[in-house]
Image (tube, rainbow, N blue to C red):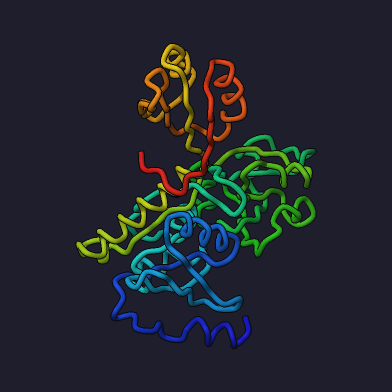
Amino acid sequence: MCSYYLDDFFTPLVNTKDKLLNFGLPKGSLEEATIGLFARAGFRITKGPRSYHPAWDDPQLDGRFVRAQEMSRYVENGFFDCGLTGKDWVMENGSEVVEVADLVYSRASNRISKWVLAVPENSSIKEVGDLQGKTIATELVNVTRGYLASNGVEAEVEFSWGATEVKVPELVDAIVDLTETGNSLRANKLRIVDEIFETNTVLIANNQTWEDPAKRAKIESIAMLLQAALEANSKVGLKLNVERVALDKVLDALPALRNPTLSPLTDEAWVAVETVIEKQVARDLFPALKRLGAEGIVEYPLNKLIP
């Protein structure tokens, strides 16, 4: 790492004492997805292309970007009041922090990710016990050693700096790697032997910070808004008009969080219906609603949804 980045990172935060929370944001693969998530939650974060210091539009917040792999240590030690990282890195670092909220998102999707044990397709390794005396490459060294020990297996675990899937079979016998879809593993002709555990992004807090009522309330508010933004990401709002005589059939066809909202129109024979539905059902639902007599069908995006 060049001195520019080191100087930039270790420059003291400006007016930190005037801020309520020092917030750690993940740099790297989660960076842009995190900025986008905060935007949908109502927080505008801006930064320079080579800066570790984000600018918030909330005067109570300050912080900086660090790698997700290191975040839990900084939160545990009190450098940050709270931060976003992977549940896997909290485990790997053995950090004692408060896990405030699960936030299921990544740079590419909103899927749960999995750490898996994988080997070449033609490998003789069929189960974890076959790794006795073998060599495994992974970024998640401590967790992998614990996994092997729990299965009574002694094997060498070496740290991988990246591109882990290309190291078998020439350099190592197996890998423990993170996957969402398994596509990269299949592309590299690898076979999953075992799924070790699932992981996702989590909002974590320093233990002492969590005992401060004002800071805890702020963190809980941020958590609620971030979860609301994620919840809204897979849903859309729906409005339509329908004659009262066809209302029951339309309501039977509508999925809803609870019950759709009904509002009378100036024509007493008609009623307006409003609800929230999953994005993925909209394309099949709309033609069905039209056939049932619905008119003026409108779909609109949602930024936040609090059930």
Q: Residue furthest front?
A: 267
Query: Could you say which is closer to the camera, residue 146 or residue 76?
Result: 76
The front one of 75 and 62 is 62
Image quarter where the C terminus lies is top left
Q: Residue at x 39, y 61 (%)?
A: 95
Q: Position of residue 270 (x, y in %)?
A: 42, 21
Give the answer, above or below, for where 254 lies relative to 38: above
Residue 177 visible in the picture: yes
| Quadrant of res 221 | bottom left
- Residue 47, compared with residue 213, is above or below; it is below
Q: Residue at x 59, y 88 (%)?
A: 3
Q: Nearer the viewer, residue 240 or 162?
A: 240
Residue 112: give x, y in percent of width and height.
Answer: 53, 43
Residue 208 in picture, x, y percent from top left:
25, 66
- In which quadrant of the rendered view does residue 132 lie? top right
x and y percentages locating residue 149 in the rendered image: 50, 47
Quadrant showing the N terminus: bottom right
Of 205 and 235, nearer the camera is: 235
**What residue sits 53% from the left and 58% below the top?**
36
Q: Is residue 138 left or right of residue 103?
A: right
Where 191 falls versus 86 (above or below)? above
